[in-house]
Amino acid sequence: MMASAICTPRLHLVARVRDLHKPLCSQIRVLTNVRAPQSRRRAPVPPRASGATIPEKFTVTTPLYYVNASPHMGSAYPTIAADVLSRFYRLNGSGVRFVTGTDEHGEKIELAATDRGLSPIEHCDALAGEYQSLWARLEIEYDSFVRTTQPKHERLVQTVLNRVWDKGDIYKANYKGWYCVGCEEYKDDGDMDDEHNCQIHRKPCEEREEENYFFKLSKYQQEIESLIEDNPEFVSPSSRRNEVLGWVKDGLRDFSISRASVPWGIPIGKDPSQTIYVWFDALNGYLSALYSDDEVELAEGASASDLQERGWPAAVHIIGKDILRFHAVYWPGMLMSAGLPLPKQVFGHGFLTKDGLKMGKSLGNVLDPVALVDGYGADAVRYYFMREVPFGQDGDFSEERFRNIVNANLANDVGNLLNRTLNLLKKNCDSQLPYSPADLPEDHVLRRAVLAQVPLVSQHYQGMRFHEACTAALVISGKGNQFMEEVAPWTGLKKGTDDEKEAAKQALVAVVEAVRVVAILLAPVTPALSRKIYEQLGLQFEGVQWAKDAAWAAGGLAKGHAVSSTPAPVFVRLEESP
């Protein structure tokens, strides 16, 4: 139903651009004040994000996806974002806990299983497998995949419910209203059109009346209102915060936490005739996910101190804006009642649209992520959605724009730059670096670019501005391409004087080092591409760290280092699907 060491000699030969219309010899100022390698001074490593502290622990969650139908791009999107965030913090040394999973109870699940001629658990097993398979295709590296039908989860839910019950926050009452099966919730008049159609699913709501158990959310009106007002980052982006604050100020109403007519769910221990409402059930998956499958007894205990040792509270819940009310209002109330810490942030991302409508299973206008990954590869899909859709805003998918953006940025700007540079090194330097990147002057255009962009990229990742992180990283490769065109090292290597040839070789070293840094900066978004770049540079990608490797001359390239003698494209251009 829940649809997160630089060595620096003084100077070697260096090319200085004077006039693009002059021959190479007039474009170069020869600098020969060279200090022996053993006398190199260490330059400072560029700082991390200004004013930011990398946390020791970082827990990010996605929604627990409702398994009424196969996964679609709308569910892959927040999972990619959560994976990007978790990879960034792992590179920075945080103890990351990345939680995802499936929400498997409720009326829609039972109906979907019946339509397929399966039992509910057979249906859930199959759909959970589809999600896990897709995550593998997309190179999603989660730490916990929780299913709400697991024993550890069911036991933890009962424990939390009992704590809330013992707090006096549960009561039984009759309720009559308009119910959306797709949302699994009763709708207010403002959430429907004049004909009682759900504004999200565009289907008629059903008028229902039944006796259920209710949670006293209204009891926590002041606490929740203060939480949102006093903590501007709790609900992000700001537009979502304003929306949530509006709901809260209108007055919180108690909500039903059970269903009498939905057998496919967790029975209430104190009254087995009713099952626990899917949202009270599923939200607790963020807690049960912190336990391994064989830790059933520990999950049943679920003390605040034990949960904190395991990574709770979450640094951020990444969710769709359509389930914001459950995460930013209901969930804090439940946790307050149960005496458990609150998540630090709820981030409501926008919708992926197609033909102007939210992409969703219930609307039948989904974009198949399996076909997209099979046709174009995981890195292309990951990059496009992180680069092209500002996180928090809506974004419309166009396959033509998808190919154009990915080809321009990854195939051309990064891939082609590295490939032509490695071919020049192969032809003129036997695929060995004639200089160390540390030999280049501190005011080298590419060295300056790296120094400037690395902290910016870090800031953008931490702020979940993934599109700006990608853009800031590619400033370096963009300057690399511009530098190559201005200096034209192929001309110096072929026709230049000895000094010009040496300057041209330095240019090649500068470019490969710049691309190496780009590989680190893009690693959270395009992990396969980054690995391939390191392989082509003759480096080991495993074990790279942001503080150690995302800096000039800090990644292992040195004079005499062998790069690939068989240069191959690290990213093949995308072609139109047949």
Image (cartoon, helix red, strand yellow):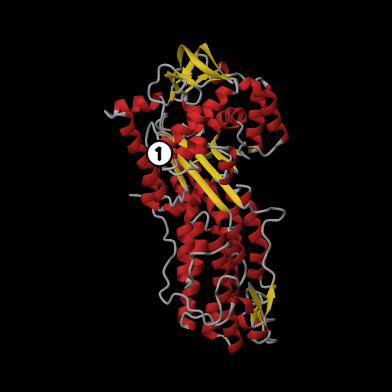
Q: Specify whether residue 200 is in view.
A: yes
Q: Which percent across, then down, holds residue 356?
A: 49, 33
Between residue 428 and residue 75, name the one nearer to us. Answer: 75
Is 3 located above or below residue 373 in the figure? above
Label 1 packing within 10 angstroms: few (<14), some (14-19), many (20+): many
Q: Which percent across, then down, holds residue 39?
A: 68, 84
Tell me the residue at 61%/32% (across/down). 339
Between residue 65 and residue 16, name the one nearer to us. Answer: 65
Q: Secondary structure at mark 1?
A: loop
Q: Which residue is mark 1?
A: 71
Is 284 located above or below residue 171 in the figure? below
Tell me the residue at 35%/25% (across/down). 110
Tell me the residue at 51%/17% (across/down). 213
Q: Is residue 577 left or right of residue 79?
A: left
Quarter holding residue 557: bottom right
Is 19 located above or below residue 344 in the figure? below
Residue type marked 1: Pro
Quarter holding residue 148: top left
Tell me the residue at 46%/63% (across/down). 531
